[in-house]
Image (tube, rainbow, N blue to C red):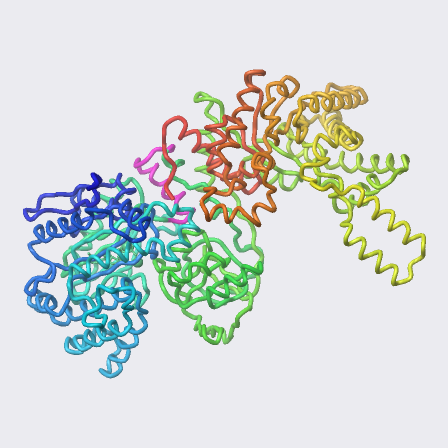
Amino acid sequence: MSEQKRVYRFGTDAQGNDVTEGGASMKFALGGKGANLAEMCRIGLPVPGGFTITCQTCVEYSGAGNVWPEGTLDEIDAATRDLEHRQGKSLGDPHDPLLVSVRSGAPFSMPGMMDTVLNLGLNDDSVQGLIEQTKNPHFAWDSYRRFIQMFSNVVLGIDSDYFENALTEKRMVAGVKSDSELTAEQLKELVCEFREIAAEHISADEHPELVIEGKAVFPTDPELQLKLAIEAVFGSWMNERACIYRKANGISDDLGTAVNVQVMVYGNKGETSATGVAFTRNPADGTREFYGDFLIDAQGEDVVAGIRNTEPISDLKIKPVFAQAGEQLESIFGILENHYRDMCDIEFTIEQGKLYMLQTRVGKRTASAALKIAIDMVGEGLISREEAVSRIDPAQLDQLLHPQFDTGSDIEVLARGLNASPGAAVGAIVFSSEDAVAAADEGRPVILVRWETNPDDLKGMVAAEGILTSHGGKTSHAAVIARGMGAPCVCGVESFSIDAANKEVRVDGADIVLHEGDIISIDGTSGIVVLGAVDLVSPELTGDLETILGWADTIRMDSSKGTPNRVRVNADNPADAKLALEFGAEAIGLCRTEHMFLGDRKNIIQSFILTDDEQVKAKALEDLLRVQTDDFLQMFRTMDGRDVVVRLIDPPLHEFLDDPRELEVAIAKREVEGAPADELEALRKRLRDIDGMVESNPMLGLRGVRLSIVYPDLPLMQVRAIATAAARLKRDEGLNPHPEVLVPLVAIAQEHVQTRAVIERVVAEVAEEFGIRLDIPVGTMFELPRACMVADAIAEHSDFFSFGTNDLTQTTFGFSRDDAEAKFIPIYLHKKILESNPFETIDDVVVELVKMAVDKSRATKDGLMCGVCGEHGGDPASIMKLFNVAGVDYVSCSPYRVPVARLAAAQAKLEAEQGFSTQDK
Ligand code: ADP
Ligand code: MG
Ligand code: MG
């Protein structure tokens, strides 16, 4: 017998006393749904009773190849008997049956991913009990037929269409439009037909326990129904769509799902009953208003499925039969917000006027809603500024930095829908997820256009740039998933008549038919659809985003609590530098100089590399000096008064030369064309020279500081350009430039010492030439493990350290990034050899190397500035480790990541000081 407790009760006992065992803090055991059901019971909200089977049970069950851990079935059995006792009803009772729902619920919410069975416990006997109790045969038979359909689909894996077709046929024969118009007698017939359909399609191999006298039948024993349903929920954890969702959202496969068994309440008991979903604030823009929909005389997922038209939650109170429940619901919104101190998302059912809460959780929201809600809640005194900052998911900020329609461009609106998920997208129309995935594989941007999406569309939704649906509201599947992914979505575009089979859309009112491949633009912020490609623009930092980032800056720069967590930018042209300043970067952490040799300058550098003639070389250097001085002038002017770390030339020189294969082809072509012999010979010499420079392993070859040692002319020219630009600005324009020189790929202290001596000599020469003082610090770039090991020796001769963590990751693992990401990292992730891609989120051992070097440097030279300039500088999880574990002073990232880094840097500070945990996935 295991000692572990696997089943937790929630709700009241027969006397009405609360017997709840779990609570909100237990979501890793009870799943989010189970933990919050327990919490709602604790705070006295009306929740139908039940029990939760733990996530760990699911993990063990799946791990053992779908075998129950010992003793678990007994524990479930005891909990079931206990629930029967608490309710005063028993499963399968022909006079007053207990019916339950079997609901999945993982530690992190996975909307629409896992499957739920309602009305479990019905059979030919217990349905009579339900009629006896409710005096409502229509309701009883309707519940029964829903149960057979759901159970068959979720547990027995039978396609729902078989049942839907039978239902449609029944309606046609009866001459009615909606299911609720069918008579009790007709529903009863339908139940018989449904059972036959089920029997016909049950796989006897997969369900030997359902075989009676050689034939598989629909299970009538409620205990067996319950066991099979729980097994199906556990099994659904590993179904394809659940796995895809977890992958897209970075949720571990190892958490498992809990199962909640809960007493049924009925929203389908006629005109005084209803079911609905709601948010305590608007999840799209954060406005403080009740938001959601309800559906009268309906059950379960009818609201989300967009089957019938829903009514807005604000109308609930207006209807006399729901007035009381509506009032109560509003007061519960308030209770939940105060309790969770956050916006909540709710499922409820009203059974004959009485309100029941079926689910709550901290609600998902768009990035702009997240900002507004956090700021409003600070204003309402519900949370502190620190909490507000710690709640915003830095990765989600990306949404706000998404492109928008250029308001300057002429926009002719083709259609309007609901603004379900913000951001704009342009792409070709596709009508199926398969087509979306195929297009994405080819790198073609597409908009997925659907009547409504369902969980099977997930792959396509991930692949598409944006999503458009013609049906469904703001809580429809498409809207919820798109908001979670940060993908632009416009839903409920009613003027789109979609014919997916023929891959066409007729646009009512516009007299247009669109076809697959036609380009459209959608704006999920406004709900507008436009024919053709609209120009997109990047948004500015304004309003709420600026407020939160302002608070974040105060937190991360507060020097009364340790050294500030600084944010710099990687920028190598004035436009990027300017943008980065607007985004709040403090300085340039990395200015690469490679691009200064490209474009129309490629000829100059090529003539330098490929000639033996000293005069030609000297002329090339002179030309380069001139253009590079101009480049630096512009950069330093833009960044006046701020540090600009300029890295000396880094890549192997042949990267600036023609591709030898292309050159070979060109020579062959000129030969055929009969080019003169001397031209051909010149081309062939060029090819030989280029071939002579090819290295067998350029990544580990003649690059970085090694170039400065072997061919000092180029880096010397660069230092001269840097120093000259600075001197001119200082002397002639009275500005205050702060260039710093970074020496790349150092492994050995002597490399740095000798290079530094040369740099200092050039700087001194320029200073003398201009007759001013020039102070240009020289720092070291750490990209090799050896350098980290001798960081103390390097520190003696270095003014600052910058960690190039992309290369440091390559050289620590011995992975070449391009090959690794294309060929084996996906396999490593799949086999769980690696937990995450070390080029996206920094590896702990690489962090250790950085920390070692930082510690050694500080032991040698107190206060030596250490920063990170790899792409990890823009990744929130890496930022946390780099500040809090490695102890660096700043991270430097690309301009668009600067706002993300500012927020993450503040959260790192909060986590280090106060143990605020940043928001859950
Ligand atoms: P999901 O995680 O997909 O939202 P749920 O377990 O919440 O799945 O259930 C699906 C639907 O069934 C929801 O609308 C929920 O409100 C409804 N439901 C679940 N349990 C009950 C119950 N005991 N009584 C009435 N409706 C229920
Ligand atoms: Mg569901
Ligand atoms: Mg739910």
> Is 178 in front, or is 85?
85
Q: Does residue 342 appear left or right of residue 796 in this picture?
A: left
Q: Which residues are magenta?
A: 365-386
Q: Position of residue 537 (x, y in %)?
A: 56, 51
Q: Is residue 192 above or below residue 534?
A: below
Q: Is residue 772 above or below residue 167?
A: above
Q: Does residue 843 appear left or right of residue 294 in this picture?
A: right
Report the number of discs.
Answer: 0
Residue displayed at 41% across by 49% down: 366
Q: Quadrant of residue 476?
A: bottom left
> Is 653 in front, or is 760?
653
| Magenta part, dominant SS | helix
Q: Is residue 434 visible?
A: yes
Residue displayed at 45% across by 72% down: 500
Q: Is residue 330 above or below residue 99?
A: above
Q: Position of residue 681 (x, y in %)?
A: 91, 51
Q: Is residue 315 visible?
A: no
